[in-house]
Amino acid sequence: MNTSNVEEINKLLNLLKTHRKYTENPNTGCMYIDQKLKNNIVNIDKQELLPYQEITRLKHPGCNLKHTHIVIKCSHHKDCFNPDHIDIMTRKEFAWVRFKNKLEILKSKVEDPIKDCWVDNTKQPTKDGYIRTSINCKSLGLHRASYMVYKNMNLCRSKVVRHMCNNKKCCNPNHLEEGTVKQNSEDMLKHGTRLLGEKHPNSKISRELALKIIASKDNGMTRKEKSEHFGVSARSIQRIEIFESFRHLRTKEELDEYETHKRIHIVNKQIKSFKDRIDDKYKLLLSQKTLYPNVSKDDSITSECWGWKDKKLDEYNRIALQKSNKHSRKSIPLHAFSWRYANNNWDDIPKTHNVCHNCGNAGCWNPDHLRLDTRKNNILDQHKHGTVNTKYTEDQVRKFKEEYLIKDKSVTVRQLAAKHNISYEAANNIAHNRSWKHVQPTLDRRVT
């Protein structure tokens, strides 16, 4: 607090002390105007003001008491304006304080605050059986909010709050623990509250039908035949057979055998290095290579163009590449992969550069026809090879430019764009020489 603010507060306190109903409690140190009015508005120098609010504004000049902050009044007297008894708090923080006060009321209604469950009977539970509350316009579970406010911590979305008392309505922090989704699922299985098999709302298979599908494992039928026989999808048959659904119907011997087989499968699985994977990928691509005669305008290119399978040579092709065992597959251009493999460069290419074609064929992936260059030079190559992806021809743009320069200013760009069948945005860029700079008209200025 600045020195000037202290002087203004002392000045206002001296004015308030001159009021005829000014009262100061020597035991608590409270200062207030004892008017016994509802709002307790005081007239000072022909101005109406609330003393505690005005003192707070002077004490915290940068805070917005109307929208972002709230005044925390004195605990002894609601109209006290002693600067030491007044403080402020953000509205978001105050919402949590108010929520904790409500929990304290629930706590006071039970005999044993530690062993007994705290249940808010004024709110209806959701379909899942949990009670929800709203804090700072955000809806969250009552038990989750209770755990956060008493433990004074924020929980990320990946963390859940587990009920150790098996009561979904309980918000007693002594009955709650932080955990993962897997631990919460194990708790539900332990307490018998997990919806298994036909009890699950999305299940379309009964217990009896699931037992018949399990018993038909060694009868020689395929999953498609089982699907037609039992009247369910092949995916449902698969999920039951690989222990993803109706697992609780399996015997302990079956579960142990499945876990042992899964561990052996993981051990026997070969984990290839990145170099081995790209080598295998490149060998596979070479086996699918198609040779095309070279029709490039560049005399320095003498080798043939490489196509891929039966794809067109004038279109880009993409392949899937997995950089590591932990990452999912990523789609990249085939010619970019070929250039990277030939140059052994797997670093990120700058956004200002592209892998360019010297031959002018977008579908070619011959590394001798590729180079890394800037985007500007790549566009120049497209103009050179005549492969620019555009809606308009050079003659169409040239006629527009010539007519734009010849005609007077009474003819607008929009009218010329409609006449030459060019969009207004493209015509505006052409007229101001922001695009199609390589196409030059015969005139060099516009008639005024």
Image (tube, rainbow, N blue to C red):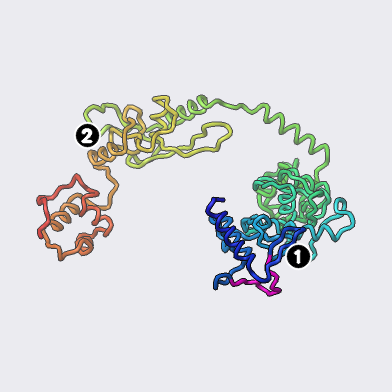
Identify residue for label 2: 297
Q: Is residue 299 magenta?
A: no
Tell me if residue 40 is in the magenta stretch: yes
Which residue shows up at 54% across the image and 51% down it?
3
Q: What residue type is disc 2 on?
A: Lys
Q: Residue at x 75, y 35 (%)?
A: 259
Say above or below: 224 vs 345. below
Boundaries of the magenta span: 32-43
Picture quadrant of residue 76: bottom right
**Which residue is at the front of the view, 237 or 67?**
67
What residue is rendered at 89% in x and 54% in y? 112
Residue 129 position in % (x across, y down): 76, 59
What amino acid is found at the position of numbered circle 1 in the picture?
Lys
> Where does label 1 land, which residue?
123
Q: Could you tell me how far apart the alpha carbons at marks 2 and 1 are, in whole angstroms? A: 78 Å
The quarter of the rendered structure image containing the C terminus is: bottom left
